[in-house]
Image (spheres, helix red, strand yellow):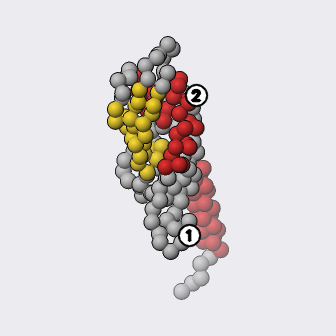
Amino acid sequence: MKPPSGRWSWILLLLAAIGLGAYAAWYAFRAPTPPAEKPVAAPASERPRRAKTARTGLHRPKPKPCKKLGDEGGELVMSRGLGEDEIRVAMNAFLPNALRCVPDGWATSGTIDTRVTVGCDGVVDSVEVLDGGGFPTDMVRCVKETIGYTPFPAHDQPDGMVFDYPVRLSF
């Protein structure tokens, strides 16, 4: 068999250059690729996260790293969630923000019973009103939305910590 002539080498080199040029043109003008999705840390339950956003000057707290079971040390490992003192301190510090919900001149005292779910990251997932205490619907809705902005400490219950909290309004 005869070795290829010098002419074939130039033809192959020209075809390779054309191929590289076509690839470069395609790469430069192709549709942009969508950004890579951030990986989900852990598949959480399928319920929607975070309480609804109210139209206020309040801001949602930044999520904190969830605690892991056994972070406290010791031999017996069990979920602790939030303690009564942690809940009380967080709610007492934040509830004065709910005073903006009270109409001017309002003088009737009462209690709005709520059920709050706080994610392990310390951010409120949901607030449910168990009993509006006879207050006007708009006032109860405002208090409910305001509680959704309360910052809590992180805890170790991955599905969230649920607790009932009575919001006592005294005038």
Disc 2 crowd, CA 10 A, few/some/many (<14, 14-19, 20+): few
N-terminal label among 1 and 2: 2
Q: Is residue 98 visible?
A: yes
Q: Identify the element where label 2 is drawn.
A: loop
Q: Which residue is mark 1?
A: 73
Which of label 1 and label 2 is nearer to you?
1
In the picture of the structure, the residue carrying the numbered disc 2 is: 57
Q: Image point 36% across, 50% down: which residue?
A: 46
Q: Amino acid at mark 1?
A: Gly
Q: Secondary structure at mark 1?
A: loop
Q: Is residue 39 visible?
A: no
Q: Which residue extends farthest top?
A: 105
> Left or right of 119: which side holds 26?
right
Of the numbered discs in the image, which one, if any, rests on residue 58? none
Nearer to the camera, 114 or 26: 114
Residue at 45 percent across and 62 percent down: it is: 79
